[in-house]
Image (spheres, rainbow, N blue to C red):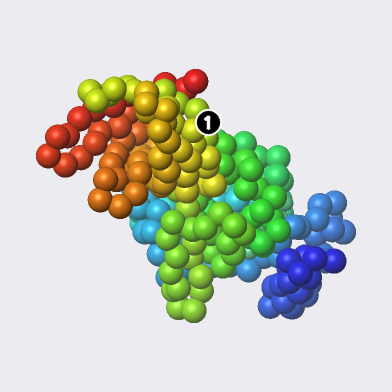
Amino acid sequence: MTRATTFSAWLRAAMAATVSGFMMAAPAAQGFSLDVPYVPTPPEVVDRMLEVAKVGPEDFVIDLGSGDGRIAIAAVQDHNAKGSMGVDINPERIGEARVNAQRAGVADKVEFREQNLFDTDFSAATVLTMYLLPDVNLALRPKVLELAPGTRVVSHAFDMDEWEADHFERVDGRSVYMWIVPAKVEGRWQVEGPQGALELDLTQNFQEVSGTASGADGQSQPVSGKLNGASIELTVGEGDGARRYTGNVQGSSLLLSEGGADSSSWKGTRL
Ligand SMILES: C[S@@+](CC[C@H](N)C(=O)[O-])C[C@H]1O[C@@H](n2cnc3c(N)ncnc32)[C@H](O)[C@@H]1O
């Protein structure tokens, strides 16, 4: 057993103990099994999770493993999201969540689906929330990284292993992590600008970018950078001669501007 598995097994037991050890065992007898026990997020943490993700009128929030519906309901009731969805495998939780949405007067904006979160299409989320377990977060990570660049992902308590959070804070002793799904820039790009052409060969590690830039003279320089959704910052070269670019990744095109006194625009296409 790996260290992570041991930790997660311990955590599962600890969470189950918090809810008297009954809730993980009981649903199996009813024909489904939980990957995570039911432990609700305290209201102040719910509020902060939605604040950190800057939920607003343009957002559609999906909570994976929605419990009594508190996150999905707060998203539309207190943070003005245009809609939300909660998914839970336990029909009892879904029943409670629907009653809670009715009571809160937001049933027309919130949907609760009784289904397995691993079978759920959550691609409509502009904000994805979760209070799950480390191994469940990790199993979801490849699908999360396929969400539209700029989608915010907020997790109560657990991280995404080596995908470092773009924001982390503690709220009343609880950990809140937030990631912004990065665009995909890995590969070779031909970038044209007023001072000629550059070939970028980029490697991506989640939101971190590195690689090399080669000019027409065949000289190669190191590149480092960072993605914030579809926004990108790149530094070509090092020290005083370094050139800094900011811009956007739009599918197979890269639009960059170089700051400073001789501000200029550059356009990249994939090779
Ligand atoms: C820790 S609780 C979080 C509840 C809520 N999101 C909150 O923060 O208050 C985890 C929830 O996930 C649900 N769950 C566990 N395994 C699931 C699965 N495979 N698919 C969907 N829901 C699941 C449980 O029923 C439980 O309600």
210 horizontally vs 145: left or right: left
Regarding ligand 1, which quadrant of the image does it lie in?
Answer: bottom right
User: Which of these two is toward me, 232 or 128?
Assistant: 232
Q: Is residue 223 visible?
A: yes
User: Residue 230: which quarter of the image?
Assistant: top left
Question: What's the residue type where badge 1 is placed?
Answer: Gly
Q: Residue at x 74, y 57 (%)?
A: 35
98 horizontally vs 209: left or right: right
Above-or-below relation of 219 to 269:
below
Q: Residue at x 25, y 33 (%)?
A: 257
Above-or-below relation of 151 to 88:
above
Q: What quarter of the picture does the N terminus occupy?
A: bottom right
Q: Residue at x 28, y 42 (%)?
A: 243
Q: Describe the element under mark 1 as helix, strand or loop.
A: strand
User: Residue 137, position in %: x, y?
Assistant: 64, 55
112 horizontally vs 172: left or right: right
**Residue at which label 1 appears:** 187
